[in-house]
Image: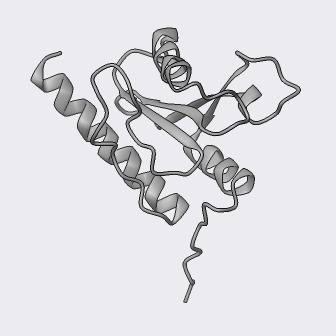
Amino acid sequence: MAKMQRDKGMRGERELLGLLSEQLGTVVQRNLVQTRDSGADSLSIPGFSIEVKRQETPFRQAWWDQVNATRTRTGVAPCKGVIPVLFYRQSRHPWTAVFDLADIYPNVDAGSLCHTDLPTICQLIREEYPHVRHEEKAVA
């Protein structure tokens, strides 16, 4: 991977993690101990493994396969621990989050991918996992 691509990826990670921190009211940091092609970009949100892609191509199944490979290596089963979420963004487009509905709703077949926007995934995180608190800002 060229340096320009790596830099763009790191800027994308910082951008997204800053937005998540702002919307969730908690510090979301990069996972600095991940190894190449494995691990998550962030594990700061309890119960979630975050992978970030900042590329000009639309969603690729290979990205989701990478997220699932991390789950397989760690042996984490759906609804039992860490839920993988893939975030991706093209230039001049908003962030999109992808997750498997089976990780949240046990009656849904695995592989039922949901593509949603940043505010919606943040709302889901706050509702489904109350230990992640959003600090409401007082309006004067």
Relative image position of residue 15 (x, y in whole percent): 33, 46
Q: Which residue is drawn at 56% across and 32% down?
A: 84
Quarter of the image where the C terminus is located: bottom right
Colour mapping? one colour
Residue at the left extreme of this rendering = 3
Quarter assignment of residue 103: top right
Q: Residue at x 34, y 22 (%)?
A: 55
Quarter of the image where the N terminus is located: top left
Left or right: where does residue 80 sit relative to residue 132?
Answer: right
Left or right: where does residue 99 sit relative to residue 67?
Answer: right
Residue at the front extreme of this rendering = 75
Residue 79's place in the image compared with 55, above or below, is below
Residue 69's place in the image compared with 138, above or below, is above
Quarter assignment of residue 8: top left
Relative image position of residue 114 (x, y in whole percent): 68, 26
Relative image position of residue 29 (x, y in whole percent): 36, 52
Left or right: where does residue 80 sit relative to residue 42?
Answer: right
Left or right: where does residue 77 sit relative to residue 64?
Answer: right
For the image shown, how many numbered marks are present on the structure?
0
Q: Residue at x 74, y 51 (%)?
A: 128
Nearer to us in this view, 116 or 10: 10
Residue at the right extreme of this rendering = 107
Relative image position of residue 81 (x, y in whole percent): 64, 39
